[in-house]
Amino acid sequence: MSAAPLDIEDQVRERLLAPLAGLRRRCRLYVALDGLLALFLSFVVAGAVQLVLDRWLRMSYDQRATINVLITIVWGLVAVRRLARPLADPLADYLLATVVDRANPDLRDRLAAAVQFSELPYDARSNSPQLVRAVLADACAAAPDVAFLRVLNHRRAARQLGAIGALVVAVGIAWSLQPGLMNAWFQRNWLLRETPWPQRTHILPEGFDEFGVQRVPRGDSVEIVARNQGRVPTSVELRWTSGDSPETREPMTQVGRDQWRAGLGVMRDEIELYIVGGDEWTRTYRVVPVDRPRIVASAVHVEPPAYTGLAPMTYQGQTTIELPQGSRLTIEGRLNKRVRAAQFVGREGAVGEVDVSDPRRVSVSWDEPRSGAYWFALRDRDGVENSRPAQYLLQVRNDQAPQLELRLAEPGASITPAAVLPLRVECRDDFGIGRILVQLRRGQEPAFDVPFELSPVGVTIVEQSLSVELRSLVALRPDDRVMLTAEAADLDPRGPNVGQARPIELVVRSPAEFQAEMARRELELRRDFEQLITAQRGVRDALERLRGELAPGVEPDAARRQQLATLSRRQESHADRALAIRREFERVLARMRANRVSGPADERRIAEAIGAPLGALGERSMPDAAEKISSLRERVDGEALERVPVAQEEILRSMNLILAGMLQSEGYREAVALLREIIEQQGETHDATLAAVERELQALLGLDDLPADAPPRRPEP
């Protein structure tokens, strides 16, 4: 309830409060004009500054965006402080009435007092109704003569409105006179597009992104290439700085009509540059050095084929890899930077399956890799590639065929039909042997399998001896030719790979022919032994001559020491020759055993009468004699000097006994061979006689003209 009586309340509203409300509205209008003018001025000034800066500096995308944010903040502050906040401030009637009273001194604050009484609650005990009515009536009576709006500065408001209109007109005129310039400013700064400024010459550097940045591999030579649009200037200059160094100016070379080039040398540090030519002054561009992508650490995993039985292998930091054929190869590399794309390539192109799901790691998996040089072709997010990548040299080892050797324990080109061949099978394979097949073939007939068991399957080395009884496989006759062959296959599922041994070709001889061959071999060995006896006599004679020149207790001179050393070495070589002859006699005996033509007499003759004495010579007597001769080189001992000729005579005596045994055995062998030959010839004569008698009987009985399948008939009387 107001303090005004009801009968005067309508007059207060009509004559006092209504004019104050109109004054309030006009005040807010003028405040809005003031705020709009400030906001328009900030728009124009900020836009002009933005245009000048961008036109002069050719700001980059991020720079223009930053300026936009700053300008927007300034505009917001102006709008809040000069427009929103003043309009939000309340304009109380009492405050407005006070202002009107001050503009009209004759009122003596009657309007303010009346407004105050009208706003206070009505209380007859505190305020006299007659006083309130008198104050309100007096104010209402004076209000019609008061110009409430005169308190406002109408001229200032008109000037502000005119200024706003002038700014709008000026912007419109500028836009109409320079539409290209204004459009470029708007699109570049508010739409953030790379719209070129309107000018006669446009120079656009190539290879830079929307932020004006070009990333170049560190250590590469940098060349700036710019494209010319519009008028071609007479000269173009590249201006650049690097780090804290002063600005460098480099004239650019014109290539053709529309291109300019300039080299900046090897890229080490970041470079900032801009280009000046004609009416063009480009924005600032940056050339940033980046490291090429590369692999800083790698691990190679090899999974060999299952049939090889090999465990998986891992190589850390190794680039030369040897792996079995059919393996699975995996290479994992740690990168120095993030990459966008990667391939594992060789001379034939990309291979394997490359995974770059982790940008800082790369891996490739490849089944059935091939030999050759391979590398990772990497490309980072800037499009920079690794120009000199580390190469992985793969050496795929094919599963070779097994290496097989088949040989006779006692080699010889002839055998008897009853021979039992001592064979030796040796086979090697990298990853395991699957089977070995040994066969015997007579002439062109089908081959017979020789019993041979490979146990266990999958071993890598086989060294096995076996005895092959020929007559259990095939009936042989003299002059037959037989061949022993062998082949081995591995476990390679793609194969298998088969290796073959060199065949053994043999000729079948009769026992008599074989004995004669062995007798010839013994004769050759006996002649070798006779030559050895002659050489041993030469050693004895040389020692005998040298013995007379040596004085007991005196050190021999250099010439005598050299002669003694030579004789000692000759004696040692004689020991080796004696042992070699013994081995050959043992081989003869072994061949005779294998071909079943040896008897107890042959065993005693060769083993006891020849082999054992030769072994004693080569292993004891001759080495001892060589040591006695060598002992005389340092100081001649009288007793040792006497023992030297005794040892030589003992050696020669043993050699003569062995030679006598050889000669005696040869006579025995010749007699045995002659008897065998007579027996064989007697057998042939017996067979020929039986055949002749059979033919005569057939002729006498008239059976020679009958067919072979005719029944027998009784002879005619």
Image: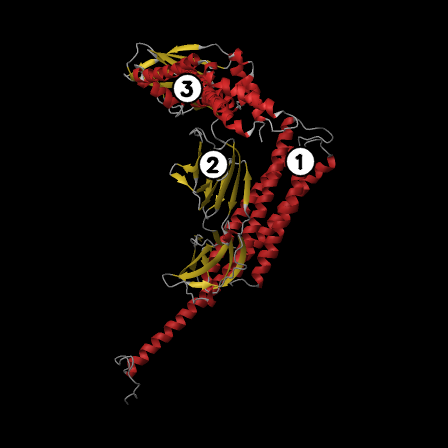
User: What residue would you read off at disc 2?
Assistant: 392
Tell me the crowding category of disc 1: few under 14, some 14 to 19, or many 20 or more residues within 10 angstroms, Cα based: some
At label 3, which amino acid type do we have?
Val
Separation (CA) of disc 1 from disc 2: 61 Å
Q: Earlier in the sequence, mark 3 or mark 2?
A: 3
Residue 241 appears in the picture as rendered = yes
Q: Position of residue 301 (x, y in %)?
A: 52, 43
Q: Nearer the viewer, residue 169 or 537?
A: 169
Q: x, y percentage for residue 359?
A: 49, 36
**Nearer to us in this view, 661 or 38:** 38
The quarter of the image holding the N terminus is top right
Q: Are marks 3 and 2 in contact (CB under 8 Å)?
A: no
Determine which quarter of the picture holds residue 606.
Answer: bottom right
Q: Is residue 100 above or below residue 309?
A: above
Mark 1 vs 2, N-terminal side: 2
Q: Is residue 278 shown above or below 401?
A: above
Residue ID for mark 3: 222
Look at mark 1 in the image and give the residue it sits on: 630
| Residue 288 visible in the current orientation | no
Between 444 and 526, the one lying in front of the other is 444
Above or below residue 638? Residue 111 is above
Give the residue furthest to the bottom.
717
Tell me the element at label 2.
Answer: strand
Which circle marks residue 218 in the picture? none
- Which class describes the residues within 10 Å of circle 3: few (<14), some (14-19), or many (20+)? some
Residue at the image position 71 percent from the left and 32 percent from the top: 636
Contact check, label 1 and label 2, Cβ < 8 Å = no
Horizontal side of 144 relative to 278 (left or right) equals right
Name the secondary structure under disc 1: helix
